[in-house]
Image (spheres, rainbow, N blue to C red):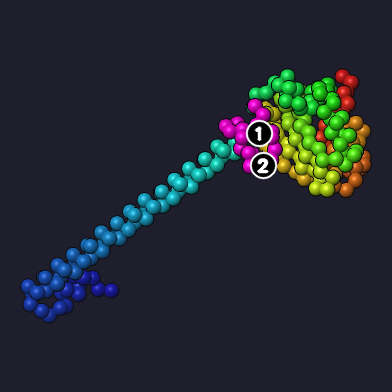
């Protein structure tokens, strides 16, 4: 392919006119290069803005969903656990009417007894439960029971310093008591289904011997 200069040399024309044409061609070529550079610059700026926007959205989402920075990240659910203060004490849990199982000791036992009575009588019911770990961190549960609609179980581990910090929502068809413990399940509640992890353990119903 001939260069502009080679093409120019083959043109049979007055030298002055040839020079004018060459100047115009070179000027157009220079403008085209400048235009291409400008397009590349604009494209780079737009690309950087898009990447920055995505990065900001990602950081913002992670901040909202991080239970350590914003404990109310689950406010779009119908659980009340996200309104519980993050650094809550055992006494405060009792005052908030939580049924508490802490190192084999039960607090507010009447709450779970009332909940079990409602289940036995197929009455809609609701209970909030706190299970305190050996290190003293509360794991919170909230259970909604309806005889027709089944069981909705919320589990909040955001205060457990040695475990995953999540707030999860699960559905089960039934809820019941087996061997002094409450389980949510779908088919039947037997030792076999419990051993096979087909039933979800919720809490103990009686104080355990230390």
Q: Is residue 45 above or below residue 177?
A: below
Instruction: Report if residue 74 lies within the magenta region.
Output: yes
| Disc 1 element | helix
Q: Label 1: how many residues lie within 10 Å, few (<14), some (14-19) or many (20+)? A: many
The rendered magenta stretch, by its main secondary structure, is classed as loop
User: Against 96, is 143 above or below?
Assistant: below
Provide the secondary structure element on which disc 2 rests.
Answer: loop
Check disc 2: other Cα within 10 Å, few if <14, some if 14-19, many if 20+. few
The residue drawn where x is 67% and y is 23% is 88
Looking at the image, residue 195 sits to the left or right of residue 129; the answer is right
Looking at the image, which is closer to me, 120 or 55? 120
Q: Which mark is residue 82?
A: 1
Reply yes or no: does residue 184 show up in magenta: no
Instruction: Where is residue 82? Give x, y as percent.
Output: 66, 34
Residue 64 against residue 208 in the figure, above or below: below
User: In which quadrant will I find the C terminus?
Assistant: top right
What mark, if any, has residue 77 been given in the picture?
2
Residue 22 appears in the figure: yes
Magenta-highlighted residues? 68-85
The answer to whether marks 2 and 1 mark residues whose Cβ atoms lie closer than 8 Å is yes
Residue depicted at x 63% and y 39%: 75
Residue at (67, 29) in percent of width and height? 84
């Amino acid at each position: 392919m001939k260069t502009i200069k080679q093409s120019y040399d083959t043109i049979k024309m007055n030298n002055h006119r040839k020079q004018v044409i060459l100047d115009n061609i070179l000027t157009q070529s220079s403008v085209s290069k400048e235009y291409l550079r400008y397009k590349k610059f604009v494209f780079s700026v737009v690309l950087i803005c898009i990447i920055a926007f995505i990065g900001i959205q990602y950081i913002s989402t992670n901040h909202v969903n991080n239970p350590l920075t914003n404990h109310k990240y689950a406010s779009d659910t119908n659980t009340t656990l996200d309104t519980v203060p993050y650094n809550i004490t055992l006494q405060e849990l009792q005052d908030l009417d939580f049924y508490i199982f802490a190192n084999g000791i039960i607090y507010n036992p009447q709450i779970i007894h009332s909940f079990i009575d409602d289940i036995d009588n197929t009455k809609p019911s609701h209970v909030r439960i706190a299970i305190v770990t050996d290190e003293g961190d509360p794991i919170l549960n909230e259970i909604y029971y309806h005889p027709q609609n089944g069981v909705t179980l919320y589990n909040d581990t955001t205060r457990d310093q040695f475990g995953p910090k999540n707030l999860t929502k699960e559905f089960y068809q039934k809820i019941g008591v087996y061997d002094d413990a409450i389980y949510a399940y779908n088919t039947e509640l037997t030792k076999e289904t419990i051993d096979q992890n087909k039933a979800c353990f919720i809490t103990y119903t009686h104080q355990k011997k230390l």
